[in-house]
Image (spheres, rainbow, N blue to C red):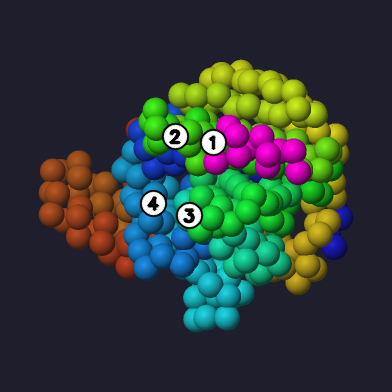
Amino acid sequence: MDNTETFDPGLIVMFGSGEAAPSSHRVYDWLLKRIPKPVKVAILETPAGFQLNSAIVAEKIGEFLTYHLQNYRPKISVIPARKRNTPFSPDNEEIVGPILRSNVILMGPGSPTYAYRNLKDTLAWNTMLAKHRQGAALVMASAAVIAAGKYLLPIYEIYKAGEDLHWREGLDLFKPYGLSLVFISHLNNREGGDEFDTRYCYMGQERFDKLYAILPSEVNVAGIDEHTALIIDLTNEHCTVMGNGTVTFIRQGQETRYKDGETFDIVELGPYKKIEPWIGIPPDVWKRVSTAREEEREAASEPPPDEVLALMQDRERARTAGNWDSADLLRQQIQETGWKVSDTKDGPELVRLDR
């Protein structure tokens, strides 16, 4: 392993819901301000991979980001890693490839149990972990949030299919950091109205109390209200709540709530410890991610070729003369060389299209 370079893990944003709702704009804006440019977002279809419209679910999130955060000009890649042992497998290197070039990785709604079955120990999941350990932000919402815990709540199996109350093994995202956490999204759901209790992600208070009673005592619960985000900063060792509702922590049966704008130490989640970034990552995956990182750096340091600079100068002269048709044609010629010209307040800027 490369122990000559230090890495800081990226931010983790966990939405109780509303990852593509107006309420999330403030959260994304806060996050993307802290992401190196250009912003490259990989959106995984996996949690909803069993649905025929899983691509549409992911694309809608991408469209939201593209439209509402256009000042960051995010480059969106949808990752159709839908199901193991299929052409759209999370172990398919070609499908997983765009994750290597991303600095924000997002997963949203679907089924927690399906997400677990089709991500655990896969190339996609291990690549996500390695990217996060090297600084990429993880954004999770709804089902993905639940799947990330030490144990996951099988929502559909209990709420829809009538299975007995139980927990299942989760992806255990925070295990390497010494944290035993269970996450509940949609904590304050009110779809049941006054007729029946759908809080605690459709379980209701009575069923959730029974579920909590069968959790191991060392496990802490983080419940996230709808249209609310829990932001976990592993590097600076603190957490922040942002959104319309609150985040509720349950430790040893005692509840603590944090509202919008409140920040607290990460030890509130449990006995946090820092780790070597490659711990638990398959060596071949770590090497692949590290190689991609180095290639990105080298590409970023390469200046545009003289022919592209000449085209940009010609375009500037055309714009100054008000010859907009020529300027548009020159923009297209620049794009055909693999570069994109963007007009900023400081003048034209060239960006490689394949990065």
2 and 3 marks in contact (CB < 8 Å): no
Q: Nearer the viewer, mark 3 or mark 4?
A: 3
Q: Nearer the viewer, residue 36 or 281?
A: 281
The reply to whether dot 2 and dot 1 touch (C-beta < 8 Å) is: yes
Provide the residue span drawn in magenta.
203-214
Residue marked by disc 3: 160
Of mark 4 and mark 1, the one earlier in the sequence is 4
Taking the magenta stretch, the answer to whether it contains residue 211 is yes
Q: Does 332 sit above or below residue 219?
A: below
Q: Secondary structure at mark 3?
A: helix
Q: Amino acid at mark 1?
A: Gly
Residue at left 76%, top 43%? 215
**Of pointers 3 and 1, the one earlier in the residue sequence:** 3
| Residue occupied by mark 4 | 62
Q: Are marks 3 and 1 in contact (CB under 8 Å)?
A: no
Q: Position of residue 224 (x, y in %)?
A: 57, 33
Task: Give the residue type that dot 3 points to.
Answer: Lys
Q: Residues within 10 Å of mark 2 (few under 14, many from 20)?
A: few
Q: Position of residue 149 (x, y in %)?
A: 69, 47
